Image (tube, grey):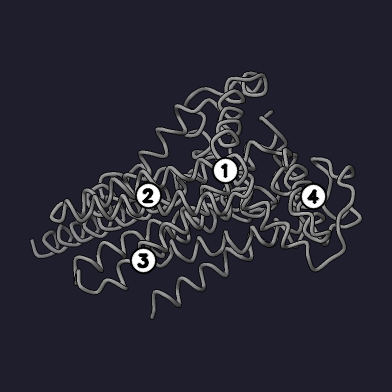
Amino acid sequence: MKRTTLALFISILALFFRTYVAYHGPIEPDESVYITAASQYNLAARQGDWKQILDSTYNFEHPQFYKLVYAVGLIAGKPILNTASIHGGNDIQTIAYWHHLFVLRMISVVFGAATVFLVSLINPLAGLFLAIDTYAIKYTSVIYLEALPAFTSLAALMAALKSLKAYQISSRNRKVWIGWLVLSSLLLGMAAASKYIYSLVGIVIIISIIIQGWKHKSVSLIGLACWGLLTLAFFFIFDPILWHNPLSELVKSVNFNFNYSVGQDVKEAGYPFWQPIKWLMISIPQYAITPAAFFLNKGDYFISADSFIFILALVGLLDIFKENKPMFIWLVVGLVFLLLWNTKWPQYILLILVPFCISAAYGFNFLHKRLIKWNNTLKERRNLTTIG
């Protein structure tokens, strides 16, 4: 109960930081893309023109689910008929219908705070680090495609591990462990149908279940096979653009991302392969005067602790490996992908911020224990000196 209460307080803090940036942060360049997609889907739904959603070619490089969630967020207000006035760098309040945009930003804010809540349940200190990380704040406070899949991918891993634990406790209680397994598939399907890169957590789930369920090899493999098929089914359901021509539409979308990764925009940015590590090392305000792939604003993040979190995460690597294998696997798998993938946009690091902050929590605990030990040793020496 105490941990739940603490997690709630930390997530409220995260909600405050994100709401502040959602209200005050200037328009980010890619926001216009997702606002346009959401407004098109919203208008089509109002007119009952479902074919327009199924056959949409706008922003086809990303799956549809999160953009459809944004479209639902526009239902309460008047439809947005023109997004031409949305330009990167402009204050959100300068847009005539800025209240609509703020609602969409708040959808991201809620998912961002919910992710902090889940992490805080695992480790309150890790939740606090995620709450104050400037990249986590920024990209779960704007109309981007990060906040929802960041939440559902974490929840999918937690549900999968719950399923394995429930099976190990009592394999006969099928409703419990099968329920958790289905929930994991549902959540990961949502994540993949929001942004492809978050499907990598599926690899983490597979490796983790195999490692932790080695005593039940055949059952674990059968369970993973069913889980994988269900995940694919949910991915298909949550990405309606695939309904007509699943394979061809998916190939076209994925090919775009591969071609983009070796395209002109990425080449002009000129980021080195280790750029994701650099994003993790330095808070956003320090990048405000540095040319980047797209507009980055200082905002007001209140706390710039990213470098501190980075150092702690390095210190905590050994302990997270020993004590939390799934999170260590997530960190390694995600970081390897980010280093190898040519596109190095800063929002991509949200893929690994959860295990990264958990590693930082382990690092803090390690240093804290060493500090107490060192302090006790000094006291003992002083006492011996006094006695002598």
Q: Secondary structure at mark 2?
A: helix
The Cα atoms of the two marked residues, 3 and 2, are separated by 14 Å
In terms of sequence position, does the residue under pointer 3 or pointer 2 come before the other?
Answer: 3
* Residue picked out by circle 3: 180
Q: Is residue 288 left or right of residue 197?
A: right
Residue 370: give x, y in percent of width and height: 25, 54
As measured in the structure, the alpha-carbon distance from the residue carrying label 4 to the one carrying label 1 is 35 Å
Count residues near mark 4 (Cα–Cα under 10 Å), then give few for <14, some for 14-19, many for 20+. many
Question: Who comes first in sequence, dot 4 or dot 3?
Answer: 4
Left or right: 339, with 91 as reference point: left
Q: Nearer the viewer, residue 188 or 375?
A: 188
Disc on the earlier residue, 4 or 2: 4
Amino acid marked by disc 3:
Trp
Crowd around label 2: few <14 · some 14–19 · many ≥20 (10 Å) = some
For residue 180, side relative to residue 213 (left or right): right
Look at the numbered disc 1 and give the secondary structure of its residue: loop
Marks 4/2: CA–CA distance: 32 Å
> Where is 385 relative to 305, above or below?
below
Q: At 45% from the left edge and 73% from the top edge, which residue is drawn?
A: 6
Q: Earlier in the sequence, mark 1 or mark 3?
A: 3
Q: Which residue is mark 1?
A: 283
For the residues labelled 1 and 3, the Cα–Cα distance comes to 37 Å
What is the quadrant of the C terminus in the image? Answer: bottom left
**In-front residue for pair 14/237:** 237
Label 4, label 3: how far apart the Cα atoms are: 35 Å
How many angstroms separate mark 2 from mark 1 (CA)? 37 Å
N-terminal of the pair, mark 4 or mark 1, is 4
Q: Residue at x 28, y 55 (%)?
A: 223
Q: Is residue 176 above or below residue 89?
A: below
